Image (cartoon, rainbow, N blue to C red):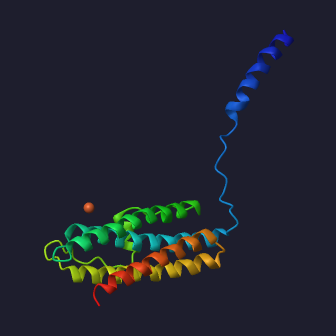
Amino acid sequence: MAKTKTKTKTPSKKQSTPLAAAAPSAPNVDIGITAGARKEIAQALSHFLADAYTLYLKTHNFHWNVTGPMFNSLHLMFETQYTEQWGALDEVAERIRALGFNAPGSYREFVALTSIPEEPGLSDSADWKEMVRQLVVGNEAVCRTARATLKTADNGSDDPTVDLMTQRLNTHEKYAWMLRSLLQ
Ligand SMILES: [Fe+2]
């Protein structure tokens, strides 16, 4: 009797062992940057993402609504810029995720985080010079935020973010120069 009881208990114990074990949880982020630095860099990148998204949307808006004798060249120039900017937004958001934080992705969050003021839409009174002026100012605002983010990343020894911000600075400083040249 005793032998039979032991035999029936043993297989049930073996079966319950894998079921009772907790599912492995995700390990903490441990990429060689302190948690405090990762948070600071992610916050700086979130401000950059909000500025870059706001500028992207403004550039696309002006691609749609530009009129006048400069239509063809500006329509194409704006398209080249917003297409490139769109790809960069993804890189920035995914860098925030790699640092262990959620990327902002709603208009409400972007409006709260951006340093670029939302100006009235120019759909009804499109003036190409005003559009170009706003894009110069917007690209320069993105440059200032990129520069601040780069410094925060450098302080935290975050080379991939330093590299990403260096690329964005190079691009947005070039856009600001090209756009400003149209008004000179
Ligand atoms: Fe288009």
- Taking 153 as reference, is 118 left or right? left
Quick check: 29 above or below 134? above
Choose top left, top right, bottom left or bottom right for residue 15: top right
Quick check: 107 above or below 146? above
**How many marks overall?**
0
Residue 101 on image: x %, y %: 54, 62
Residue 128 on image: x %, y %: 21, 79
Q: Which quadrant of the picture is home to ligand 1?
A: bottom left
- Taking 96 as reference, is 121 left or right? left
User: 142 or 25, which is in the foreground?
Assistant: 142
- Taking 38 as reference, is 1 left or right? right
Q: Residue at x 65, y 59 (%)?
A: 29
Q: Quadrant of the N terminus?
A: top right
Q: Residue at x 60, y 75 (%)?
A: 153
Residue 130 on image: x %, y %: 23, 83
Residue 158 on image: x %, y %: 63, 71
User: 170 or 158, which is in the foreground?
Assistant: 170
User: 71 or 40, which is in the foreground?
Assistant: 71
